[in-house]
Amino acid sequence: MPVHITIITAVHAPSARFLPEAYASVCAQELPEGWGWRWVIQEDGRTDEVHPYVPDDPRVTFRQGRSGGPGVARTIALAHATGPYVKVLDADDLLTPGALARDLAALEADPALGWATSRALDQLPDGTTVAFPGDPGEGPLASGALLAHWKAHSLPLVVPGTLFVRRELLLALGGWMALPASEDTGLLLALDAVSPGWFTAEPGLLYRQWEGQVTGQPAHVDAAELKARIAVTEARARALAALDWSR
């Protein structure tokens, strides 16, 4: 039997209609011999609106649970992850061809690396793409590099939605932060605090821009909440770094 990479997707009703496109991008992935994937889709809530879009594929698992935000949904989905690696894929995003294989190659080549990320492109409503500014060069990212950039700019150096991570390390950190937003950035900074990572310069994700995405809602930039999210995210990463715990 092949060794599996578990792809974890949190979905809510407004983004469910994009699942078939995400599925097509997953099916297009080519992996080395002996490797396969499983896709765990976790609805953030219990509605009748998501299931019709879930692919009918034995490699795909769909579950529902009480609403708690995408971080809670992903962490619940983590209970059903198998294999040595976990890949994050938001319901409204798309993997580019070869993304899984590139992530896998980076971590298989160096056991010291705990996680990998890649370049992402914004996909605009008209189908055109725009690159994110300020990507690092391809290669290893030393532990602490992301936190230093965060402290200087209050922005992640790499796109958290491209994360590929060793499952045991993800479990050791407790999954995603219990935040209403920026939970993926919080996880990424925690990983950076305890382990070096890898950045692939070739785009691995198309980040869809659309009117209903959570990051586009006014609550996402509420000043008081944003200040608290930044503070606790940075404090957690600094506390982990101070423990001098590495994988």
Image: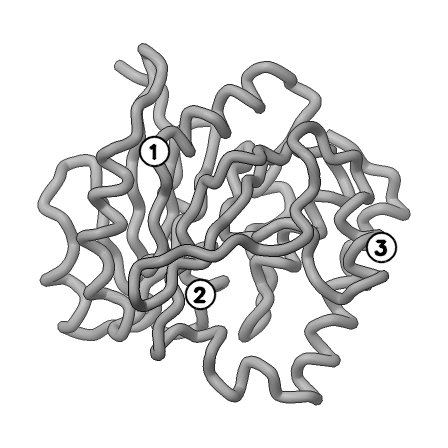
Q: Residue at x 35, y 78 (%)?
A: 211
Is 181 on the left or on the right of 20, as rendered?
right
As helix, strand or loop, the secondary structure at mark 1 comes to loop
Question: What is the crowding at mark 1: few (fewer than 14 residues within 10 Å), some, or many (at least 20)?
Answer: some
- Percent of width and height locating residue 5: 39, 30
Q: Position of residue 168 (x, y in %)?
A: 56, 34
Identify the disc placed on residue 97. 1
Task: Indicate the quadrant containing the C terminus: top left, top right, bottom left or bottom right.
Answer: top right
> Image quarter for residue 80?
top left
Do the numbered discs 2 and 3 sit on residues whose CB atoms are within 8 Å?
no
| Amino acid type, residue under disc 2 in the picture | Pro
State the image coordinates of residue 13 (x, y, percent, origin top left): 25, 73
Give the distance between the C-alpha atoms of the residues marked 1 and 3, in whole angstroms: 36 Å
User: Residue under circle 2?
Assistant: 70
Left or right: 49 with respect to 13? left
Q: Which mark is residue 247?
A: none
For the question of whether residue 247 can be seen, the reply is yes
Q: Is residue 68 above or below residue 74?
A: below
Disc 2 on helix, strand or loop?
helix
> Mark 3 — residue?
238
The answer to which of 140 and 33 lies nearer the viewer is 140
Residue 179 lies, in percent from the top left, at 59, 71
Q: CA distance from mark 2 to mark 3?
A: 24 Å
Residue sitting at the far top: 33
